[in-house]
Amino acid sequence: MRARPARLERLPEQYFTGLLARVARATAEEGEPLVDLGRGNPEVGPPGHVVERLVDAGRRPSVHGYPPFRGLPPLREAIAARYAARYGVELDPEREVAVLPGTKTALVEAALATAERGTTILLPDPGYPDYHSGAALAGAAVAPLPLDPLAAWAPDFGSVRASDVAALYLNYPSNPCAVAVRPGTFADAVRFAERTGAAVVHDFAYGDLVFDGRSAESFLAAPGAREVGVELFSMSKSYGMAGWRLGFVVGNAELVERLNVLQDHTRAGVFAAVQEAAVAALAAPEEHVRERAARYERRRDAVLAALAGSRVDSVNSEATFYVWLRLPEGVTAERLLVEQRLAVAPGGGFGSRGRGWTRLSLAVSDETLALGLERLRRAVA
Ligand SMILES: Cc1ncc(COP(=O)(O)O)c(C=O)c1O
């Protein structure tokens, strides 16, 4: 067989595969049972009626064929209705909504749909490591968009030196920084895009998981946003449907069409039963989503209480289901793993500006979190 094509060689090590392997090795070693606060995998599924809808749909003989490649019209209408009701954004379900098997797919395909070889994609630093994958496959260069820890991790557009920027990825609420968007950030991104011709790809995976009375803010609500970019909405976190693999790309009609062309060529839609159940989820009262956010907020409070009076001096958690904190001198993620049998996500894996920080997941049971906090407290007291 010939050598691997260069585009595969360009792919970086997948951060979470590496992390899982490291945690699995540690689990196999002798010692008390490992506590894993490293992974962000929703621990509670969608409401019961959504699962029932999936089961009922699955019993219908006609549901098992190929679905329409571009998604069921009622599903596109349901996400448009939710965007209008929840974020005050009107979407045309025909032209401004693409249905994809999860936003991880969309993150890669957005790079393929915007960047030529040799152009640059700006990625938040610190940011979600998978953003690098699409740029690598597209043959694009990557340049950091530094997030400023002294400005609640808002992007510092003034320090960007890259030229020929094809796309700019943003992510608020932020994984890993666990902050909500600051006023003016989306407007700055629109101005940057207008000046440079870059497309904005806003990853809204944690959109609804905001705390302390904040309201969820869509990039598309910013004036001019729809002319320059798209937003990625995921069913995974708001509804606990990560394993179902369903997400949306909404906004700029030209970019939505490009994503749809890629779907036409590389997939044959998403299982119709999953789409029908998602309609039920999107149309349900928002209470379930609010309860989910409230549960993570309660756990966030437990983390703050556990760290009060400790050597940890910087803790962020106003959104998402993470806590992003700076580890005190001498404490590292590796030492937590080996000495405390506690797995966390090391901040350096999210970019050079994440070094010295670490991410804890709140998407675990209360008991697991309590045990993890006991061990963390031991290390940082
Ligand atoms: C910031 C961010 N974006 C996107 C995704 C992918 O979500 P999906 O399940 O829709 O593929 C994740 C998943 O953890 C994430 O943390």
Image (cartoon, rainbow, N blue to C red):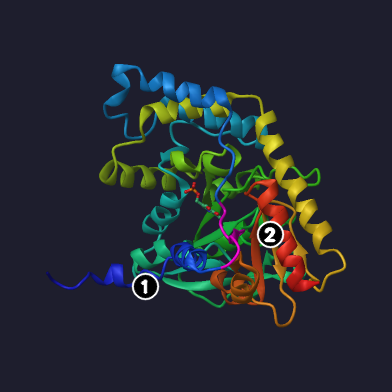
Which mark, residue 372?
Answer: 2
Residue at (69, 43) in percent of width and height: 216
User: What is the magenta segment's predominant secondary structure?
Assistant: loop
In this picture, residue 225 sits left or right of residue 109: right
Residue 267 in percent (x, y) is at 29, 42
Residue 308 in percent (x, y) is at 85, 63
| Residue bounds of the magenta highlight | 31-40
Residue at (57, 53) in percent of width and height: 40
> With respect to residue 109, does 45 lie above or below?
above
In this picture, residue 101 sits left or right of residue 301: left
> With respect to residue 236, does 161 lie above or below?
below
Screen quadrant of the C terminus: bottom right
Question: What's the amino acid at mark 2?
Answer: Gly
Asked whether residue 367 is in view, the answer is yes
The kind of secondary structure element at disc 1 is loop
Neighbour tally class for label 2: few under 14, some 14-19, many 20 plus, Cα within 10 Å:
many
Residue at (53, 39) in percent of width and height: 235
Question: What's the amino acid at mark 1?
Answer: Gly
Screen quadrant of the N terminus: bottom left
**Residue 183 forms part of the magenta stretch:** no
> With respect to residue 231, does 82 lie above or below?
above
Q: Name the residue tied to disc 1.
A: 118
In this picture, residue 4 sits left or right of residue 331: left
In the image, the residue with mark 2 has its CB under 8 Å from the nearest atom of ligand 1? no
Residue at (36, 58) in percent of width and height: 112
In the image, 92 versus 265, the foreground residue is 265
The kind of secondary structure element at disc 2 is helix
Looking at the rendered image, the disc whose residue lies closer to the viewer, 2 or 1, is 2
Q: Seen from this angle, which residue lies furthest bottom? A: 330
In the image, the residue with mark 1 has its CB under 8 Å from the nearest atom of ligand 1? no
Quadrant of residue 178 within the rendered picture: bottom right
In the image, 306 versus 313, the foreground residue is 306
